Image (cartoon, rainbow, N blue to C red):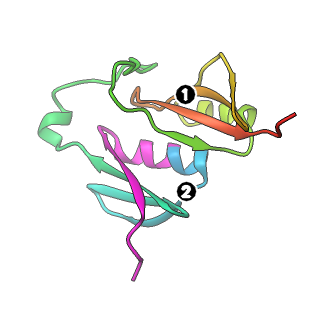
Amino acid sequence: MVDPAAAGLFIYARDLERLRAFYQALLGLGEIHVREDVAVLELPGLQLVIHAIPRHIADSFEISSPPERREEAALKFFFTVPALDEAAVIAAAHGGEVLDGRWDGRGFRACNGVDPEGNIFQLRETRQER
């Protein structure tokens, strides 16, 4: 039995399989379980739960290519990756994008990204303070 995660994030997806593959490749998430309607992925201390939008709702809208960015969401999540440049290559190969514009925070360098369904997130790479 898997212990419950201390923290997590839900994402509702029109194309569950595509988002599952995107976040697994980009973040190196392990797979706890996958069904037709849900995928539960995990990093130590965090679960990412991707729920399929019910078919009758998902069939009522399209996702453009590239996706329209959902920039006005009230929440934005972030993940730390080994290298932002490597993350950009992985994101592009899986239908997403790492956006231009980088900034420094305390102990990290960051940029925004977009997943294949238009959700905006932030990526960070650790950097040494000078």
Q: Nearer the viewer, residue 27 or 9?
A: 9
Asked if labels 2 and 1 touch by Cβ distance under 8 angstroms, the answer is no
Q: Mark 1 belongs to which amino acid?
A: Gly
Pick whichever, 12 or 54, lies toward us. 12
In percent of width and height, residue 104 lies at 71, 26
| View extreme (left): residue | 56
Residue ID at (29%, 50%)? 51
Label 2 Cα neighbours within 10 Å, binned few <14 / some 14-19 / many ≥20: some
Q: Is residue 33 left or right of residue 97?
A: left
Q: Does the magenta stretch include residue 31?
A: no
Q: Residue 113 carries which label?
A: 1
Whole-percent x, y for residue 59 in the image: 18, 32
Looking at the image, which residue is at 55% across and 37% down? Answer: 94
97, above or below 54, in the image: above
Residue at (26, 55) in percent of width and height? 37
Q: In this view, does 105 lie above or below 37?
A: above
Helix, strand or loop at disc 2? loop
In the image as oriented, which residue stretches furthest toward the bottom?
1
Given the image, on which type of amino acid does mark 2 rest? Answer: Leu
Location of residue 68 in the rendering, given as x and y in whole percent from the top left corner: 38, 17
For residue 19: magenta?
Answer: yes
